[in-house]
Image (cartoon, grey):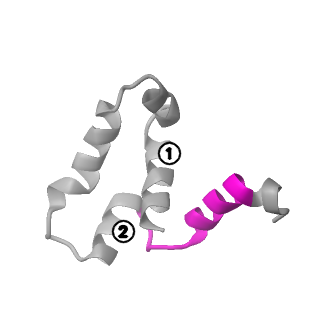
Amino acid sequence: MLAAQLWATIEDDLDDPRGLIRDGEFQPIRDWLTENVHRHGQRYTTDELVREATGEDLTADYFLDYVNEKFGEIYDL
């Protein structure tokens, strides 16, 4: 759930992160993660860190969106 929520925020904050990955350009994503997640170390609890990085509480919504996008057509979801 957390990865899906972080990825959704990365997609909002960076221009075409999938294209960056496709082109082997990982530095902008790494920079985003460093700035919004890694630099905080153990300063925050997980719940606080999610709020700081994404602007909202941890939610399953982004994971469910991912699952529906990936498997929806296959399993008629």
From the viewer's side, name the closer residue of 12 and 70: 70
Range covered by the magenta-colored residues: 55-71
Disc 1 packing (10 Å; few <14; some 14–19; many ≥20) = few
Circle 2 residue:
51
x%, y% of residue 32?
31, 43
Whether tag 2 and tag 1 are in contact, CB under 8 A, the answer is no
Residue at 60 percent across and 69 percent down: it is 61
Helix, strand or loop under label 2 = helix
**Which three-letter amino acid code belongs to the residue tagged 1?**
Asp
Circle 1 residue:
12
Quadrant position of residue 27: top left
x%, y% of residue 3?
43, 60
Is 10 in the magenta? no
Q: Is residue 55 left or right of residue 65?
A: left
Tag of residue 71 = none
Q: CA distance from mark 2 to mark 1?
A: 15 Å
37 to 20, vertically: above or below: below
x%, y% of residue 9?
46, 52
Quadrant position of residue 13: top left
Residue at 80 percent across and 56 percent down: it is 74
Disc nearer the start of the sequence (2/1): 1
